[in-house]
Amino acid sequence: MTLMHRELALKLALVTWLTAVWVLLWGNVSVANIAGGIVVALFVTTVLALPTVPVEGRVHPLSVVRLVGVLVYYALVSSVQVAWAAVRPGPNPVNAVLRYPVRIKSDLVLTFMVDSLNMVPGTLVLEIDRAERVLYIHVLDVAKPDAIDQFRTIVRVYEDAFIRAFERDSEWHPAVVHTTRDDEDTVVETAHDITTDYSAGPDGKDRR
């Protein structure tokens, strides 16, 4: 299937989906509602079309299943930890903002990972530095000496799971859609320059 045929198939599927949603909103299957849904769907996909999202790498179903398991497991563990921090006696939990360099190259996969981190109770990604590929993450309850290292380990597990599911090094390449040669060179240079030191910043000091 050529790129043009793939885009046409995706647009047809989107028009069909939007038309079905339109009919469901009206609550009545009729020729007028179907025709109206098609008109609205064509307007949305043509006049209000969003830019194409570059997609790199491949999807590995078994790794996706493992990724879902990782997300569910740590979401449950974090829920218990946050609940205990809220009801336990003693001083208020100590919070911190941690600097975490990522190895993920694709902005799309990075967005998936950030959204997943934001769903973890007590965790919030405050800032994304796309140029340096760095996340600044707010973390709850890091009073224990090893709490920061434990959190970095959890984020590393998340990142590894996303890379195995969507962005293995042997398969990943910059998307050519809506990119220039300079863009591709920048992505490749960034991928080679990303640090893998997850315990400290560039100056050797932990960023809290």
Image: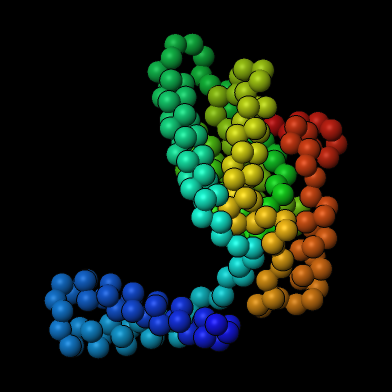
Task: Please identify the residue farthest to the right as the structure is shown.
Answer: 203
Q: Where, quadrant-wise, is the C terminus in this rendering?
A: top right
Q: Quadrant of residue 125?
A: top right
In the rendered view, tell whether residue 55 sits above or below residue 9: above
Q: Quadrant of residue 203?
A: top right
- Residue 21 as seen in the image, left or right of residue 87: left
**Residue at position x 28%, y 72% in the image:** 21
In the rendered view, tell whether residue 180 sits above or below residue 198: below
Q: How many marks?
A: 0
Task: Please identify the residue farthest to the top as the structure is shown.
Answer: 90
**Residue at position x 67%, y 55% in the image:** 168
- Residue 13 as seen in the image, left or right of residue 138: left
Give the image location of residue 58, x and y in percent: 60, 62
**Residue at position x 65%, y 32% in the image:** 153
Give the image location of residue 127, x and y in percent: 63, 48
In the rendered view, tell whether residue 5 sits above or below residue 201: below
Q: Does residue 129 appear in this view?
A: no
In the rendered view, tell whether residue 206 sits above or below residue 156: above
Q: Where, quadrant-wise, is the N terminus in this rendering?
A: bottom right
Q: Does residue 37 appear in this view?
A: yes
Q: Nearer the viewer, residue 161 or 184?
A: 161
Q: Nearer the viewer, residue 20 or 143?
A: 20
**Residue at position x 81%, y 68% in the image:** 185
